Amino acid sequence: MGVTVDVAYKSLNKFNEVLCGDKVELLQTENSNIMILADGMGSGVKANILATLTSKILGTMFLNGATLEECVETIVETLPVCQVRQVAYSTFSILQVFHNGDAYLVEFDNPSCIFIRAGELVPIPQNIRVIQNKKINEYRFRVKKGDALVLMSDGTIHAGVGQLLNFGWLWEDIAAYALKQYRITISAIRLATALSRACDELYQFRPGDDTTVAVMRIIDRKPVHLMTGPARNPEDDTAMVAEFMSGDEFTKRVVCGGTSANIVARTTKKSLDVSLDYNDPDIPPIAYIDGIELVTEGVLTLNRVLQLLRRYVKNEAVTEEFFLELDKPNGASMVAKMLIEDCTELKLYVGKAINSAYQNPGLPFDLGIRQNLVEQLKHTVEDGKKVTVTYFMRLL
């Protein structure tokens, strides 16, 4: 099936700045995944604009097959030049991993990529090219399952300068710490967050520079099938469940909704056992069906899942408290954790049912319409993952 990646990043704004001067762009093509980290000169609004322009230009041009020379030339000609330093735009790193295992790394003035394989650091050779008077390191290599690659802005190596550390956090020390965290973390977001948190601590929680860590891990495929709501006609139940149960040995399955759970249990001739443990008073308990990873209540649970996913997408909200929430043993946290850390592609199987139980204006959110939640879920998850939705209509 080729190479599959888990990608995530974590940024810290310079202390007292509302906007981050670093920008990460995550892109997908038919045959590759691309991660771009741009670090705008300075901080605040100006740096944010420069980094955003750089990452967008590089991403758009790469997606359209432009060469590195064309990309750099466009950036040099497009972005403004600092009148004081006579230096333009921002530094950047580009990592492209193809599904066949080929990888391509480009670095311009950012700290060198940390490449971890089999619990060891892999040195990245210096292959310097001069383009538009800029020295750019270019590296082509192969990746395999288990590899991790970490891109960083220079806020990482500046962490602790003049405070806890005289000369900042040396690259070698960051790499050693990344190696340690690689062995005990299970996902890209946990590794990125661990490195970012260490930088924040060295800055004594008042970052002196925008600081970003972006991680790409090479993993097995992790497809997730999520079914919610019944099909249009009772005779469609079998077809809906058959599609939901399709997949390979990597596929995990989640059912959200009592009616859906009963349909799956009946169709697969398995028993449905409901837990009596209320771990969260606002979220109904989970249930169990043999062969299904997770069975939860429907709309209330999906609404909480959506709230957690939105916090994840809002990068600054990913804190230790967020992970504590994600690790809770309630249905919503368990679904959200699976979608964030244990999913590379999501297939949603949705019955378009109008359930009168969800039209109560006393519910703590607008709607009750399941498909509205599903659409929001789709748009939230597909930032970095492939999402497909199949609708099955039924009138209750």
Image (cartoon, rainbow, N blue to C red):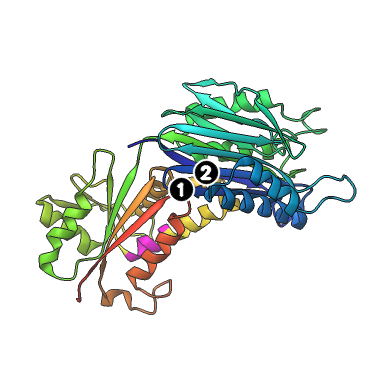
Disc ID at residue 29: 1
Residue 140 coordinates in the image, percent (x, y): 54, 29
Label 2 to label 1: alpha-carbon separation = 8 Å
Mark 2 secondary-structure assignment: strand
Mark 1 secondary-structure assignment: loop
In this view, the residue in front, 67 or 115, is 67
Marked residue nearer the N-terminal end (2 or 1): 1
In the image, what residue type sits under mark 2?
Answer: Ile
Q: Tag 2: Cα neighbours inside 10 Å, few (<14), some, or many (≥20)? A: many
Residue 38 coordinates in the image, percent (x, y): 66, 45
Magenta segment includes 133: no
The mark lying in front, picked from 2 and 1, is: 1
What residue is rendered at 47% in x and 48% in y? 28
Q: Quadrant of residue 215?
A: top right
Q: Tag 1: Cα neighbours inside 10 Å, few (<14), some, or many (≥20)? A: few
In this view, the residue in front, 276 or 231, is 231
Q: Is residue 379 visible?
A: yes
What residue is rendered at 48% in x and 26% in y? 183
The residue to which callout 2 is attached is 34
Residue 275 coordinates in the image, percent (x, y): 25, 52
Q: What range is drawn magenta here?
A: 299-305
**Looking at the image, residue 183 lies above or below residue 319:** above
In this view, the residue in front, 49 or 159, is 49
